[in-house]
Amino acid sequence: MEFSSAVAFIFSILPLLLLLKLTFSWWVSPILNHLKLKRCGFGGPLPSFPLGNIQEMKKKNSLSSSLGSSNLTHDIHSTVFPYFSRWQNSHGKVFIYWLGTEPFLYIADPEFLKKMSTEVLAKRWGKPRVFRHDRDPMFGNGLVMVEGNEWVSHRHVIAPAFSPLNLKAMASMMTESTNQMIDRWIAQINSGNPKIDVEREVVETAGEIIAKTSFGMKGKNAKEVSEKLRALQMTLFKTTRYVGVPFGKCFNVKKTLEAKKLGKEIDKLLLSVITSRMKSIKRQTQEDLLGLLLQGNNNHQDDGKLGKTFTTRDLLDECKTFFFAGHETTALAISWTLFLLAMHEDWQIQLRDEIREVVGDKELDINTLAGLRKMKWVMNEVLRLYPTAPNVQRQAREDIQVDNLTVPNGTNMWIDVVAMHHDPALWGKDVNEFRPERFMNDVNGGCNHKMGYLPFGFGGRMCVGRNLSFMEYKIVLTLLLSRFSFKVSPGYNHAPSIMLSLRPTYGLLLIVQPL
Ligand code: HEM
């Protein structure tokens, strides 16, 4: 065969080869995987090609996704995850379901989780690759997504930035933003409207706080970055997504392009902050997270690497990661707390008394805040009933043996924290009641399994920012409870739902009265 006809032949069979490859990876391979998982001992709802179980996941629960204003129940699992609640009834607390052609191991059994996680070191866990691409504009290769030895070195550099000593310097930034929010509320109340959507307000304030504490941005700039980052999150999570489905992105090209554009704009804004801070690295005095990371890496090299670990790209991804992982989870914990306190006036009074005794006229610093014990029980109980990070995800990077079951290498995992936090078998009959005192003498709140309470995840990958969130939670609540009392507004519609975090779908309308 002549050279030119050989080339022509190769080109003519290329589409066929491509078709075979796609057929194998999207059709044959998932079927083989399904059979393998069945052989390994896992059941679950029957998937169909190409959506897997997505169709069923979109079906609304018969209870409907809104609980209304008259039924302020905390029994929310079947509202926020109706499909998991249905599948649990027929397949138990551990089963396989499918997002498109990707298998996910659903876990709501803490004993299974304990056995599985003791088998695997933190650095050997993966994060679902199928989410990596989807969430790239938000997290890039930041700490939430990075794996293996790279994760070890990122975590090693980042963790000390959250030490109590470093957090101390951030308290005043938090107080400043909260006081600005309080001034807005007073102006609104004085104009005759005491109904405030506390979720919208607190999320906005927490966005500003994290922009200040992460990248040292203030005023208009902080607002712009935080607004763009939030717009990106909305674009990615407010629309119906077909993660795991072949050509899933094509279902929503407009939103995908919008997310990409926002991602680039944010990168540009943050990049200018990072480069100007790198130039003044020797004079580095700012005590925000970026400043601390730069100080920790201050032997600036010419090859684009910052000292031990971080490139400029790494820093950019970490700044975005802090923003996304940090601000909404904390803000929603504060918002759900205000809601629960509005329902339980006795606890508002108890916390106000504690604030008066422990804080009084003292400065709001980390040592003083440590004395707010009841406030910590309240935070724990709020994160039990309304875990703002409602699930934890992993991917197996090796076969994992749990008793007589094998979790095959590559299996994605979805740990349903909402289900475990509302399981009467773990917490008893009062599981759906707000009882902060259950944490009085037990950090695990009386849960009968130590892996049944996971608001901040588990093992070596547990939330690195939890100290920052404890401090922010206590500062914001102390300032708010010292100035206002809260009641649930008759217009509030109780509809917790998932948009990455667990949030109130229609906002959180409370009646706020100055004390
Ligand atoms: C109430 C507030 C918060 C909650 C409920 C929360 C919850 C979580 C959860 C469940 C995880 C996953 C852990 C796992 O995979 O086992 C996580 C990881 C993480 N969180 Fe938080 N978080 C909060 C606040 C924050 C804050 C304030 C920051 C930073 C400013 C932050 C940064 C991170 C990062 C970077 C990770 C990834 C850690 C790693 O994989 O090594 N979080 N968080």
Image (spheres, rainbow, N blue to C red):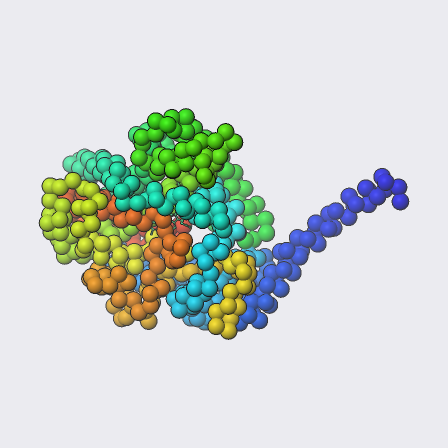
Please say if 111 is above or below 231. below
> Could you tell me which residue is drawn at 29 percent across and 56 percent down?
383
Q: Quadrant of the N terminus?
A: top right
Q: Residue furthest front?
A: 299
Q: Nearer the viewer, residue 511 or 236?
A: 236
Instruction: Give the left or right position of residue 334, taking residue 147 as reference.
Output: left
Of residues 111 and 263, the one drawn nearer to the viewer in this rendering: 111
Q: How far across and how far down the image is residue 405, in percent?
A: 51, 71
Question: Looking at the image, can residue 154 be seen?
Answer: yes
| Residue positioned 33% across, 61% down in the render | 453
The picture quadrant where one finds residue 67 is: bottom left
Please indicate whether residue 36 sits to the left or right of residue 443 in the image: right
x then y, percent, for residue 499: 40, 50
Q: Residue at x 43, y 44 (%)?
A: 154
Image position, residue 426 (x, y; %): 32, 69
Q: Residue furthest bottom?
A: 404
Q: Position of residue 288 (x, y in %)?
A: 32, 36
Against 433, residue 360 (above or below) is above
- Position of residue 296 relative to residue 24, above or below, is above
